[in-house]
Image (cartoon, helix red, strand yellow):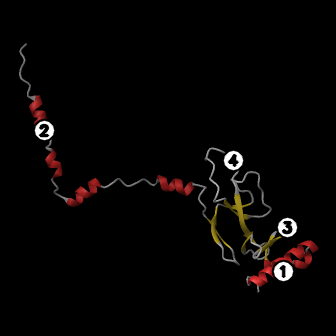
Amino acid sequence: MSEEPSTSSSSAIDEQPDEDEDLLLKDDAAEIERLQLPIQSQEPQQEEENDERIARIEFRCSYCDMHEFVHYYGREPPFALGILFREDTYVMRDPFQAPPPRWQTKAEYYIAMGANCANCSKVVCKDASCSFYYTKTLCLPCGAEELKSWPVEAQTRLRKQLAAAKESGLLK
């Protein structure tokens, strides 16, 4: 058994491309395309679209023109455990409170921003110069129309709010 010199090692060296050949650019556009980062998949955007922590419902008060995006519109916000509103309400998570981890079902702080007027269906915020709540939310003009049908205590409170709103110029 004689050992014959192996030629495979020399042919393997010959088959390896020179490192300098990689640096030669024949087609700039093809080289730029080859070096660009791969296009990111659409999954992160879909996660963002499904994230319930992002406020997507637009809220704009008809009287003071306050504009905000809220997290929920309805009677029972899923993030405020045990809370049931008497009417459909625009609710947002407290922006100053850190959200709990996703796997924990923990009640979060919330802000009830406003509701629709029960008579005219205009969107009103909970500010005293825009709305009044007595068994249902009413904008101040609708509240002034129904004033006589309420108990004396509620009438007194609404008259004070109407006077303050007239002084501030929000109510004509």
Q: Which residue is mark 2?
A: 15
Q: Position of residue 145 (x, y in %)?
A: 85, 81
Residue at image location 49% in from the left, 56% down from the top? 45
Assign the N terminus to one quadrant of the image. top left
Query: Which image quadrant is residue 63 in?
Result: bottom right
Query: Which image quadrant is residue 27 in?
Result: bottom left
Whichever of labels 1 and 2 marks the residue nearer the N terminus, that label is 2
- Disc 3 crowd, CA 10 A, few/some/many (<14, 14-19, 20+): few
Please name whichever residue, 143 or 88, is drawn nearer the observer in this view of the structure: 143
| Distance between mark 3 and mark 2 Cα atoms | 87 Å
Q: Secondary structure at mark 2?
A: helix
- Up the image or down, 10 lies above or below 76; here it is above
Q: Mark 1, mark 2: which one is toward the viewer? A: 1
Q: Is residue 45 left or right of residue 147?
A: left
Q: Which residue is mark 1?
A: 144
Q: Which residue is mark 3?
A: 135
Residue 151 appears in the figure: no
Residue at image location 76% in from the left, 55% down from the top? 83
